[in-house]
Structure formats: structure tokens, C-alpha cells
Image (cartoon, rainbow, N blue to C red):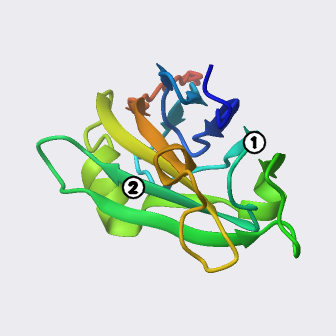
Amino acid sequence: MNRRRLVTALGTGIATVSLGAASLVRRGAAANVRFSAGRVRLSNDSGDVERVFVRPTGRVRWRNFDQPVTGARLTFRATVPGRTGWKTVHDERYALFEEGKTTGRFRYTPERVGEITLYEGTRANELFGAERDGETREETVRIAVRVTLLAASGRPARPTDEAQFGDVATLATTAVNEGATVSASGRANGGIE
């Protein structure tokens, strides 16, 4: 049995302006990584999308590392396959323990990490918006999540092969431009003089 075994890494991201569902599960000898995003849908009278973002929540647990872990690096990258290249949308280091621990856990929440914008403004609307009345547009976003457990030096803690892990999830998106409708009614009251 490997005495330096990473126990678990779990995560959840919720895409909140309009879009999609994603899930990822990777099981290997060293890690169990799970990342998912809840399904959300945008429906409005213009079909415009202003921003696509996630609010990640999750935890990472490790046990019996050779070197104390003092921090974690959390990286998110995103792409719309066939339309954009990969871009880093979040890359931050988080201090965990001043002295470090060879066994421990790290929780990341929206309060700690914040909202992570994948696409915004004109670019978000170009990629995800539904331009025509009555149009429904579906798109996918691939989200890569990577966690690195850090030693006091700022480098991956030993064993380095188990201190770095992640995978890719697919987020399905839907935007709906509600069709315009009109109705009219009237009445003519006749009269004579």
C-alpha cells in the first residue's frame, strides 16, 4: 500500500449566468477528483449573455506527505471547442498553514475564491448569445481544473507526482431569445346624429 496517498479532491462549480451543466470524475491510484457545474439557463427578451462564470466550492484532502503542505494553488482554464483557445481564467495561491501539515485538508468556497469569470462582455455574447427572436442557442465550454499542493518553498510538496492533479469538465450552455409577440384588440362604437 502506498503510504503517501492523496485521499480525495472534490469540487463543485455552479455556472450562474445562464449556462449549463458539467461533470467530471477521475479516479486513479493517487487521487479521486470530482468537479461538476449545475445546469442553469438564460432566457430573456434579447438573448444577450453578459457573463458566464462559476462559483467553485470544494475540498482537497491529503495524507502522509513527505513534506509539509503550507498552501495550495488553484487554476481554472476555459475554452469553447472549435471557437476559442484555452485561456487561464483563475490562477491563485492560497496560504493554508504557517507550519505546514503532512496530513490535512483545504476547502475552497465562493467566499474564499470568489466568482470566476469564464467569458464576459461582447465576447460572452458572441460565443453564447441568441441573436434572433425565438432562437435557442446551445454551446459547450470545457473547463480545466488543476490543484497543486505547495510546500513552504512555493513549489509542489513531495511527493510531487501526487501533489498536482486535475481534469477537464464539459459545461453545456443554453441561451434563449424569447420571441417577440404582439396582440391588439379594439372596438368601434357606432353612432349617428
Residue that extends furthest to the bottom in the rendered view of this protein: 153
Graded by Cα atoms within 10 Å as few (under 14), some (14 to 19) or many (20 or more), the crowding at tag 2 reads: some
Front-lying residue, 183 or 99 = 99
- Tag nearer the camera, 2 or 1: 1
Q: Is residue 100 left or right of residue 89?
A: right
Number of marks drawn:
2
User: Is residue 75 visible in this depiction of the protein?
Assistant: yes
Label 1, on which residue?
64
Q: Where is residue 1 drawn, in percent x and y?
A: 62, 19
Q: What residue type is labelled 1?
A: Asn
Residue 189 position by quadrant: top right
Q: Which circle marks residue 77 in the picture?
A: 2
Is 152 rendered above or below residue 36? below
Q: Where is residue 177 drawn, in percent x and y?
A: 39, 35
Q: Where is residue 166 drawn, in percent x and y?
A: 47, 41
Q: Residue at x 54, y 25 (%)?
A: 186
Residue that extends furthest to the left in the rendered view of this protein: 82
Is 12 rendered above or below residue 92? above
Q: What residue type is labelled 2?
A: Arg
Q: Are marks 2 and 1 in contact (CB under 8 Å)?
A: no
* C-alpha gap between disc 2 and disc 1: 29 Å
